[in-house]
Every structure is written in C-alpha cells, then in structure tokens.
Amino acid sequence: DKKGIEIPNFIDSELWNEFLKIRDKSKKAVNSELSIKRLVNKINKFHEKGLSVNEVLESSVLAGWTDIYEPKNNNNNKSRLGWK
C-alpha cells in the first residue's frame, strides 16, 4: 500500500486500489495513515464475521462511497444487495 500499511492478502488489490482512488477524489475523505489503518481494521472485523470483504469493497466502489459498510440483512436472509 502507498501508506506502507500491509493490506490483508484476502483483499483483491485491484478493487482496493479503485476504492482508494474514489477516496482520493473525494474532498471529505483523506487517505491518511490513520484512516487507512482504521479501514483495514474494519475489513478484518468483517472478514472475521465471515463476510465477503471483496463484495463489501465492490459495493462501496460501485456506489462511490468513501467508507465500507457491513451489509444489512433483510427478512429473507439476504443483504440489501442480494448477497447471501
């Protein structure tokens, strides 16, 4: 990573770099060392819960979000994006 922070090997590097580009383009998001560390910690927590981190990142990229969010499940056990 450009901040010298090790990104977990289960993260698709192309997707991660695209996510960082979106954050770079935003005037409200800063890719400081602290913010990247917090994002990586959040990603690790999602991974520990058994969530597909790459799907979470992809949804953020597609929506143009500068943060990542845990998918919210609805009554039929699918997330709001249709993932099981």
Image: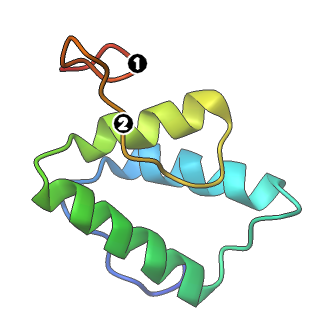
Residues at badges 2 and 1 in contact (C-beta under 8 Å)? yes
The quarter holding residue 43 reads: bottom left
The percent coordinates of residue 17 (x first, y second) are 52, 53
Which residue is pictured at 31% across the width and 47% down the height? 12
- On screen, residue 38 above or below 76: below
Judge from the rendering whether residue 52 lies leftward or rightward of residue 54; answer left or right. Answer: left
Q: In this orientation, does residue 1 appear?
A: no
Label located before the other in sequence (2 or 1)? 2
The quarter holding residue 78 reads: top left
* Quadrant occupied by the N terminus: bottom left
Say what amino acid the circle numbered 1 marks: Leu
Q: Secondary structure at mark 1?
A: loop
Question: Residue 81's mark?
Answer: 1
Q: Residue furthest right?
A: 27
* Quadrant occupied by the C terminus: top left
Q: In this orientation, does residue 8 appear?
A: yes
Say what amino acid the circle numbered 2 marks: Pro
Question: Residue 71's mark?
Answer: 2
- Disc 1 crowd rating (10 Å Cα; few below 14, some 14-19, many 20+) is few
Question: Residue 63's mark?
Answer: none
Judge from the rendering whether residue 67 lies leftward or rightward of residue 15; answer left or right. Answer: right
